[in-house]
Amino acid sequence: MSEEIKFGYKSKPFGHQIREVHKQIEWLQQGNNYGALFQEMGTGKSKQLVDIANFLFHHGKINAVLLIGPNGIQCQWMDQQVPEHSSVPYLPCLWQNTSSKKYKADLENFIFGDAEGKLKWFFVNVDRFSTVSNKEAISYFVNYVQEHNTLIVIDEATIIKNSSANRTKVIQALGKRAKYRYVLTGSPVTNSPFDLYSMCEFMRPGLFGCSLHVFKHRYGLMVNDHNPHTGQRFARLMNEKDLAIAKSLIQRGQSFEEIAMKTGASESVIRYIAENGSVAKPYRNLEELKRIILPFSSIVRKSECLDLPDKIYTQHIIEMGTEQKKVYNDLKKSLLAEYDGAELQVTHKLTLLMRLQQVSGGFFPSKEGEVMTSKMIGKSNVKIEFIKHDLEEAGDMKCIIWSRFRAEIENLESELKKEFPGKVVERYDGSKTSEEKEVIRRAAQAGEIDILIINPQSGSRGLNLQDHFHLHYYFSNHPSLEYREQSEDRSHRMGLKVNVQYKDLICKDTVDLKIYDTLHSKKDLSEYFKTADLREFL
């Protein structure tokens, strides 16, 4: 290994991390200014990126990093990843969507001021690039990039897989101003190899030397179709039914020309299917695509990382929406809140804790007669949106989502079924009969369920899921320490062959963090509150 690429680590790296960081540095030393960490969730790609940034700063190549990620990810980078792994002095700044004069002044000082030998880190929620109304925000990012030798990093890079999305176009344009560009994702081809196109356009514009349309026809099995209402014609990817029909017609001995006419595919597509009879997915030339991206890509699977620990805990700090934040703060301050014509008032400290937790989960609980109901606050749920983004990164990993409240479980089930129609989503809670639970349990243990949403009171005991479920989300924690520990052990038990990840979704400045800290200090909240003061806790 070259002496030039040796440098100090703040946190001890695993063997695969050393290997991949050195591979990336050697690539950059050849005069390249982009790269990709295509590594499965839980392999430590964030640390590797920080180490790469440390190296570039140490050798005078950059003096700033612009980190772009989904809501919650940018906070995790600022609060955990950079402090834990940066071996060089740094100056952090978190983008805040506020009109505060003080913040604007602080932001301008951060952008244009002297960092005094520190690496500037600017952490930004990708949503800031989505709308025209964020023009002022985008100008700050442009100024930031132009003022410095900047490394732009996109974490969970599937957030820019849609080439026609406004935020993808803005970020790609911004990337052209940067000195270095990196993407990080656990699954670069979550839905299809087509997702690679916009990521690579950000890293190196023109890498494939063709338009997205040509790219799709090069690497996909496409058919011509039309809209029956408008008559408009368009090209789309073959589905399972299309493939089955084509294979059937090939077996019957029909000519490629006849099959092409019947299916809407080209003769070259039909020929490919005929010559590759075992093809199960509508893609082709993938080995060629792999050869193109391999020089700048670090590809790591968890199965290769034998030195990783069994349990990996991460907190994901998520910013609440404006309406949600107002409801939460009103309830916290005055024990009374209103939303959409409904009113909520509490008097007991454990009830207040529960109601605050429901609001931080994105739902407003209110009483209609003698029945408690919940309605979603705002148009979207920030925690559910986080899970959607994260599951894009997780690829084929099966997961458990732990949720305390019925409204959360119902909305998770509905939203995730819509977002991932190809995955099997099931809930395991009080809405299921004993017989239904037994069917779900058997299916989960057989690996036939992809996303399992569980209420800890129903599922923290009796489910042995170590064979298939190695990713857990805690949408909302139950205050019982026993439930928390038992829920973790659904996967972490005898027979486990890989590490297990536990991700707690924590809304910023809410009881979520207090509950998390209390449980991780091995305290049960119901016991804790027998002596603790609620106001002090809040």
Image (cartoon, rainbow, N blue to C red):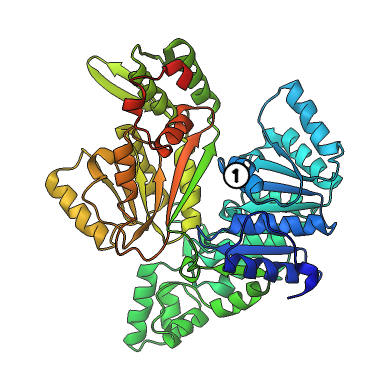
Camera-nearest residue between 248 and 418? 418
Q: Is residue 442 visible?
A: yes
Residue drawn 67% across and 54% down? 10
Q: Is residue 130 above or below residue 265?
A: above
* Left or right of residue 95: residue 261: left
Camera-nearest residue between 153 and 512? 512
The residue sitting at the left extreme is 435
* Left or right of residue 444: residue 54: right
* Left or right of residue 292: residue 104: right
Amino acid marked by disc 1: Gln
**Which quarter of the image is occupied by the N terminus?**
bottom right
Q: Could you tell me residue 99's position as x and y percent?
A: 70, 23
Q: Is residue 285 visible?
A: no
Q: Residues within 10 Å of mark 1 (few under 14, many from 20)?
A: some
Q: Is residue 325 above or below residue 290?
A: above
- Which quadrant of the figure has residue 238? bottom left
Q: Count how many numbered circles sit on residues in the image.
A: 1
Camera-nearest residue between 359 and 47? 47
Q: Mark 1 = which residue? A: 80
Q: Could you tell me residue 27's position as x and y percent?
A: 74, 71
Camera-nearest residue between 500 and 309? 309
Residue drawn 67% across and 42% down? 123
Q: Could you tell me residue 407's position as x and y percent?
A: 33, 32
* Left or right of residue 320: residue 165: right
Q: Secondary structure under badge 1?
A: helix
Q: Could you tell me residue 354's position as x and y percent?
A: 36, 24
